[in-house]
Image (cartoon, rainbow, N blue to C red):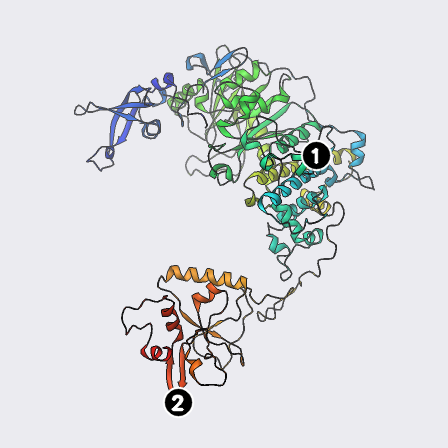
Amino acid sequence: MPPKTRPISSEWAETLVGLSMKVPESWWPGYKSHKLCDGRIDSYCPISQRWNLLLDTKEDDALYLMAYEAIYKYADFDSSTYNEFQLTQQPIRDGDDEIQTETKKYFRTEPEEWDEVVIEDGGTDTGGRPIEPLAWEGDEEFTVKITDEELASLRDIDGEIRFEKVFQWCLPRFGDDDDQTLFEFQAARMRNYMRKRVLESGFKPRYYKGDKVITGDHVARFYGACLCRMIHGGRSIEQIFSTREIMDAVPSIRESMTKSCLEDLTTCLHYSDDWDPECGSDWDDIYDDPKVLAPPGTAKHRLKHGLLEDGYNKRWQAIVNFGKWITTDESRVGGWYHSCMTIGPEPKPIRTGATIHTVCITTGRLSTYKLFARVYGGQFDEDIPEINDYGKYKMISLYDLMLEQFKHKGHCVVMDSAYMSDAMCQVGREEWKINMVGTCQSNRTGAGSRGKATVAARGIKVGTHQSVMYQHKDKPITYAIWADNNYVKTLSNFHGPNLLRGGIQRKLRDPVTFRRNKDFTDVDCPEQQWVYCQTYHLIDKGNGAEAKYDLSTESHLHGWSPKLAARFFNMNLNNAYNIYKYLYTKYHPDRTPMLMRSCINDLTHSLLQQGSEIRTRGFGDAPSATKDITTTSSSLDGRKLRSDAVRQPFTSPTATVTGTPQTPASTITARALRYRKSDFNRQKEMQPGRNHLSVPLIVLDKKLSYCKYIKCPGFNTGAKRARAYPSKYVCEQCSMEKGSDFWLCNSIKIVDGIKTVVNCHAAYHVDMKLYEITAPSSVSVSTIVSELTE
């Protein structure tokens, strides 16, 4: 089970004593008004992790326990002392403000350790003491690391560098000597998984039977099919192989593989052999490929995709020469909360959701290139303490893992508020030798409360672009607040409190109409704010470029692992395009690289045609490009429509058919029976009394269907060949239960020249005790029917 939530920091909790509150009167029994009552926090109870509220009234001196969520919501922000308290969206818990390394423990700084640095208008642009960044000795810009042999492999027969070759060069390598491509590695895992499903679940592949096995080229074609589906709007497999509608059919995929092949590949997607053979059998006796799985101790949420994730990260870093500036970001993993990870049985490996954390290049010609990506499983991610443990502050441990390849070199890292704190600044500069700058939440630094109080005291409003800066008295840390569209708070361990005059352009708002001006105006800003604005938006630009080409997979068959695999594949698309542009402009300076859309199209064709042919015969003619839509029948195209299809061509009613339309039916096929049962159950829910109804059916001319009741009066007519009366009525429910039309008389017959009611339907169900008779004259069986059938 995951560990319990850490207790709230008592030291921080005591600082909230004296906070003014306004709580609703409806909290107390007998009161229903929404009037707000004045009060204040009197004390803190560490046992219950609650604060005691004391009302400002002489009649009530009792103490009422309040949770922090209520304190944060009902604090009196109009109070003159409000800015003196450190209110955070979530309570500060033990360990949130300290980091334990091998040599030293780092704490969140105290407010009194900071000095404000005021830079007057028209005066100098610098203040406080200067802070020198850590030295960087390499090249400023990232470059591509490639040999002459590798470069030659990326050219076509005319010597031109091709994107599809660059893309496959950027894909991860596996095996002891990196001699196994991604497609070969994944094909082996899928072969093992298909074998497992065949043996343990009775799975019957539709294509991979006999000597047919999944190969690396088949996996490449599968990825090509995913790209092609993405280009065509994420169509289903049924639509892709349509023979009737040109708007649905995707000829490129149809010619590349069969429908059954694509279905088998989609069903058996897998990236790790994360299971053991049944009954303790030996792996090599059952499976043709060796067992490959994540190393021992891998976090539970990474068991399926961990090898894939590590392979991409290793390859992306191996093909570039490191430069100086990098940027980190986090984003929520799509579909996580509705995956098997969060709705499966206990114990759940992740309870707080997951985010994907990335390291990206944001300067130079390789801008938006991803260097690292890691799916983080929240506060209970088991990998973090296994690799590097910084105590209870897991974000530092995660960042230690992300920046492992960039330590002790003087890199400059731009980050957002998810990572930044003054403790992070200290560890980054003193332990990892990294320059850090980024946005910061007020509760992550000791200067936060002082800056908040200063902004309120001076009445600084958003949109005025005024700045407030603080510098730590001893440590090389600078905290700045800039009043842009919001209060932007930044922290840096290599910038002094410097102000850039006219450093950033903004469209100012009119103070009266609040409309933005059409022209840009130069405004002042802190130097560290300028650095953040110059770089951080580029990582979002890269994410946007990838989002345009999100792969389409039937991922609901497997949970969320294929979504993550597709996400890494998308990242590789953007990375490969950056490499392609870099190499193309360098070695073909007189030519322009292709647009990314054209590159994706060429890559799709290349993957769909990789290796030997899967089809042994052609798919056939594509659906017609034009259609006669005069009538439903005239618009039919392609394969013949099944007689039991739900959507049948509309037929004009003839003059001989009058009255209420009847249900056409003949022999009930298995599929028709399934649909009829589904329809009956749906009607049964709306009509609970619907039970063994007699239903008329249309029958062909000259075709007679005879009553199934053994006591049918037709046997007593004295005919030479004794048999029941012919009928056009069936029992709705009995027909479904028996699997064939169950005919029963329910009409008027001429008996001895007299018209007589023959109701074998009711008589049969009375005999079978399917109807209840409450009286001899029940409407279920008429007197005439009883006389004829006895």
644, above or below 255, in the image: below
In the picture shown, does residue 726 fall above or below 266?
A: below
Q: Observer-nearest residue: 431 or 616? A: 616
Q: Nearer the viewer, residue 400 or 237?
A: 237
Closer to the camera: disc 1 or disc 2?
2
Task: Give the structural element (helix, strand or loop) at label 2.
Answer: loop
Q: Is residue 323 left or right of residue 586?
A: left
Query: Quick one: quadrant of the C terminus?
Result: bottom left
Marking on residue 192:
none
Question: Residue 472: image x %, image y %?
Answer: 48, 13
Residues marked 1 and 2 touching at CB (< 8 Å) = no
In this rendering, the count of numbered labels is: 2
Q: Is residue 789 left or right of residue 187?
A: left
Residue 394 percent coordinates (x, y): 50, 23
**Position above or below: 766 against 264:** below
Q: Could you classify mark 2 by the number of other residues whose Cα lies within 10 Å: few (under 14), some (14-19), or many (20 or more)?
A: few
Query: Where residue 537 appears, x then y in whole percent?
Result: 57, 32
- Mark with earlier residue (1, 2): 1
Crowd tier of the residue under label 1, counting other residues whose Cα lies within 10 Å: few below 14, some 14–19, many 20 or above: some
Where disc 1 sits, the SS reads helix
678 left or right of 640? left
Say whether residue 161 is left or right of residue 294: right
Q: Amino acid at mark 1?
A: Cys
Residue tagged 1: 170
Q: Marks 1 and 2, how far apart in space?
A: 92 Å
Task: Give the residue at the far right of this rendering.
Answer: 158
Tell me the tag on residue 753.
2
Which amino acid type is shown beneath numbered disc 2? Answer: Gly
Q: Quadrant of the N terminus?
A: top left
- Which residue is most to the bottom? 753
